[in-house]
Image: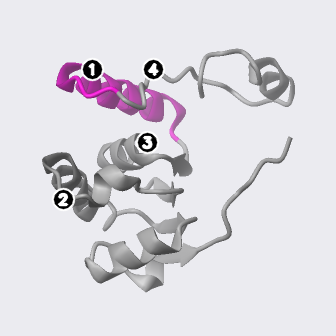
Amino acid sequence: MPDDGRYLQKLQSLGYNCISDIASSKGQNPFQELLLLLHSKRVINAIKPELICTFTIKPNLYTAIVIKGTPIKQIANITGLGYAFINGSMKAKLFSLLYRYVLKSVNHIFFQNSDDYSFLLQSNIITKERSVMIFPVRVLI
């Protein structure tokens, strides 16, 4: 979770063990990404969860890589792939290749964008048996 303190005390008071996230959503430094992957592995090995529910591209990918070959189950939530994923760029091709590799081992995938769901189905990156389209989560303030 982000280390901004907004929800930390509330979650801890409810009995949750919170671990600070060192991820940068826009980071592209390969060394930093490797450190994030290793950090994720250490945290997962320390906690030994039965199930991990992930959101956003990096946690979806990195968690799947770290838990591959373990009994840990993963539910990946894909809120949106974004234009960068489908625009044909080298970055888009890399993420497509990574998603093709790791999503095969994810137990279930929730989608909040029907275009992304259709795109990944048509690209044979996911299957209907392990994925479902859900309504987007909206927070009204």
Instruction: Locate residue 25 relative to residue 139 in the image: left or right.
Output: left
Q: Tag 3, which secondary structure? A: helix
Q: Earlier in the sequence, mark 1 or mark 4?
A: 4
Residue 22 tag number: 4
Contact, CB < 8 Å: mark 1 with mark 3?
A: no
Query: From where the camera sits, is residue 125 visible?
Result: yes
Quadrant where the N terminus lies?
top right
Magenta-colored segment: predominant secondary structure: helix
Q: Earlier in the sequence, mark 3 or mark 4?
A: 4
Residue 10 locus on image (x, y percent):
84, 24
Q: Tag 4, which secondary structure? A: loop
Residue 59 tag number: 3
Image point 36% across, 32% down: which residue?
41
Q: Amino acid at mark 3?
A: Pro
Q: Amino acid at mark 1?
A: Gln
Q: Earlier in the sequence, mark 2 or mark 1?
A: 1
Q: Residues within 10 Å of mark 3 (few under 14, many from 20)?
A: many
The colouring scheme, among rainbow, by chain, secondary structure or one colour, is one colour
Residue under pointer 2: 88
Residue under pointer 1: 32
Residue 46 locus on image (x, y percent):
48, 28
Q: Residues within 10 Å of mark 4 (few under 14, many from 20)?
A: some
